[in-house]
Amino acid sequence: MVVAGLLAARAGSASGIAISMPQIIFFIVYFVLGYALYSSVAAALGAMTNSEQELQQLNMFLMMPLFFCMLMLLPVINSPNSLLSRVVSQIPFCAPLLMELRISVSMPQPWEIVLSIALILVTIYAVLWISSRIYRVGILMYGKKPNLPEILRWLKYS
């Protein structure tokens, strides 16, 4: 990652685009947080399924927030400090992409960055807690496809 950052900084300076050290630091922070968030959701989906075909059917739940982020890229680039940009960059599943974009386009207020990181951390904790409950029971339910009421019952098991 360090080499990629140095190469990006060199390429950016050659093309007239400056990449600052805070941008690189926030990129790494949001990358790690986003990876942890989406991988914990993927782990929960994997625990609920028995085959790759079943997992591919549930994969849309993992991809929908990313599609929403792609729809919001242009509004955030055009006006990074608008109310819409500020709200969508606080949504935990969108913050790793959209808050980093806002930081690159126009540095937001420090409290917005801290709030988005805090919301992502709380969401990671909640998703990991839910994923661990689903995984603990779901891994033992081999061969049986769970439905929503059964998954909710798994969350109640202690």
Image (cartoon, grey):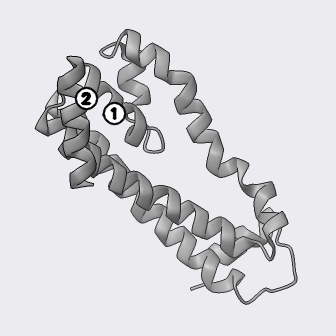
Dots 2, 1 in contact, CB < 8 A: yes
Q: Quadrant of the N terminus?
A: bottom left
Rendered residue at 56%/86% (across/down): 158
Tell me which amino acid carries mark 1.
Answer: Met
Rendered residue at 51%/63% (across/down): 39
Residue where numbered disc 2 is placed: 103
**Residue 144 percent coordinates (x, y):** 87, 80
Residue where numbered disc 1 is placed: 99
Residue at the farthest right position: 144
Q: Is residue 94 above or below residue 49?
A: above
61 vs 43, left or right, is right
The residue tagged with tag 1: helix, strand or loop? helix
**Residue 93 percent coordinates (x, y):** 48, 44
107 vs 87, left or right, is left
One can see residue 138 in this view: yes
Rendered residue at 55%/69% (across/down): 130
One can see residue 107 in this view: no
Q: Is residue 46 above or below residue 76?
A: below
83 vs 59, left or right, is left
**Residue 117 percent coordinates (x, y):** 28, 47
Tell me which amino acid carries mark 2.
Answer: Ile
Badge number at residue 88? none
Relative depth, front residue between 46 and 116: 46
Q: Is residue 85 above or below residue 112?
A: above
Relative depth, front residue between 18 and 46: 18
Number of residues whose C-alpha sits closer than 10 Å to that of mark 1, classed few (under 14), some (14–19) or many (20 or more): many
Residue at the farthest left position: 21
Rendered residue at 56%/61% (across/down): 41
68 vs 73, left or right, is right
The residue tagged with tag 2: helix, strand or loop? helix
Q: Is residue 4 above or below residue 78?
A: below
